[in-house]
Image: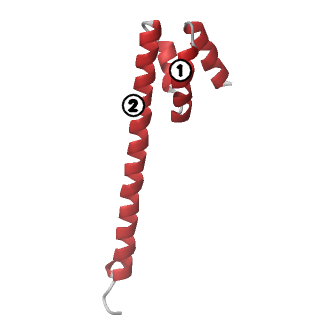
Amino acid sequence: MLGITLKQTRVYQEIKEEGREEGKEEGREEGREEGLEEATFNLVMRLLSKRFGKISPKIRGSVAGLSLHILEELSEALLDFKNVDDLLAWLAKVAD
């Protein structure tokens, strides 16, 4: 009728911009969470290496699959481990 499409309306443009801003914020939040998880994983691996020496790729893979919450629990639990068997038992318990 007036030669105006829905995409040209002010309401459409405002909604589109709002969606774009929400998407950016979600992306930032996901990035922060991924960064924190990676940093926690790296710290846990350094602590395990310091305590037990070289960590096998199998154990490294098991630890890499843990969520941030579980990695944080491991960072505390590893202070009580006497040997790698304690670590393996803890990982097996968490996997159940």
**What residue is shown at x 38% (from left), y 68% (from top)?**
18
Residue 34's x, y, as percent? Answer: 42, 39
Residue topped by disc 1: 62
- Crowdedness near tag 1: few (<14), some (14–19) or many (≥20) residues, C-alpha within 10 Å: some
Q: Amino acid at mark 1?
A: Ser
Q: Is residue 48 above or below residue 96?
A: above
Q: Which circle's residue, 2 or 1, is located before the other in the chain?
A: 2
**What residue is shown at x 34% (from left), y 69% (from top)?**
17
Q: Is residue 55 visible?
A: no
Residue topped by disc 2: 39
Residue 87's x, y, as percent? Answer: 57, 14
Q: Is residue 8 left or right of residue 68?
A: left
Q: Secondary structure at mark 1?
A: helix
Q: How many marks?
A: 2
**Residue situated in front as seen by the camera: 69 or 13:** 69
Q: Secondary structure at mark 2?
A: helix
**Residue situated in front as seen by the camera: 11 or 79:** 79
Residue 47's x, y, as percent? Answer: 44, 17
Q: CA distance from mark 2 to mark 1?
A: 16 Å
Q: Quadrant of the N terminus?
A: bottom left
Q: Amino acid at mark 2?
A: Ala
